[in-house]
Amino acid sequence: MSDNEVTIAVDDCYKAFGSNKVMDGLTIDFLEDTITTVLGPSGTGKSVLIKHILALMYPDKGDIRVYGRSLLSMSDDELFKIRESFGVLFQDGALFGSMNLYDNVAFPLRQHTKFPEDKIRRIVMSNMKDVGLQNAIYKMPGEISGGMRKRAGFARALVMQPKIVMFDEPDSGLDPVRTSLLNDLILDIHGKYGGTYLIVTHDIRSARKVAQYIGLLWKGKVVHWGEADEAFRSEKPFVKQFLAGDSAGPLGMD
């Protein structure tokens, strides 16, 4: 097990929407300078987990701590400040359709800093180069492929030099080759800058390729958390079924 410190601690969290228990005592840690992939069937609360870590939702019971501080006890100003240490890549890249790629990536810097434009340009161009889009800065989101939109979204997620980067199904809508290339990029960027990466995905191949740690969610709980190799060797019926993609096992169509 790693000696890395815990960056994010989700501690015994419960969340229900009516009779639907999305979190039912969910407990999971995310470690400094590691990549953790969160997997699980649809409807198990993977995206809801990200919203709780961003304090866009609050648990009905339990606690979420970032760098040891409870999000539940923070003021709005404190939450705003700590969110500056987060970068988020949403499923579709969440780009502004009326802005070219350069302005999309520059947007957080213009909103949250008082940097002069020449410094903003240096930072933006460095991040665009990191994701291979330095020659597409004037393209509009509607003019580029889904894979390029993901890369532009990744550049924007990195532009504030976040210590924590969260990916909400980054492979959604991508073919297997572009998914593999995006995974290569995630590994390259993490190797260059470090940080705590949390990746929510359904894609087992992505988890196998990028994850150092795997958290597997089912019925509102974490049924496995540990090093990726350990997860893929697990003999627990649900873990083994899900990671192998088998039809036989405790997970059915319901």
Image: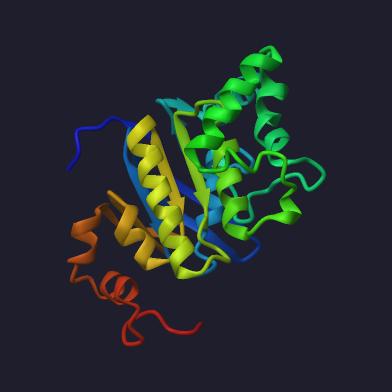
Q: Residue furthest front?
A: 135
In the image: residue 137, left or right of residue 2: right
Residue extending furthest toward the right: 98
Whether residue 158 is visible, yes or no, is: no
Instruction: Locate the N terminus and report the quarter of the image it occupies.
Output: top left
Q: Residue at x 44, y 66 (%)?
A: 177
Q: Residue 202's image quarter?
A: bottom left
- Image-based side of 243 in relation to 107, left or right: left
How far across and how far down the image is residue 235, in percent? 18, 71
Q: Position of residue 124 (x, y in %)?
A: 60, 28
Q: Residue at x 73, y 55 (%)?
A: 143
Residue 253 visible: yes
Q: Residue at x 63, y 51 (%)?
A: 149
Which of the two residues, 169 or 46, is positioned nearer the viewer here? Answer: 169
In the figure, residue 88 lies in which quadrant? top right
Residue 56: x, y in percent? 64, 41
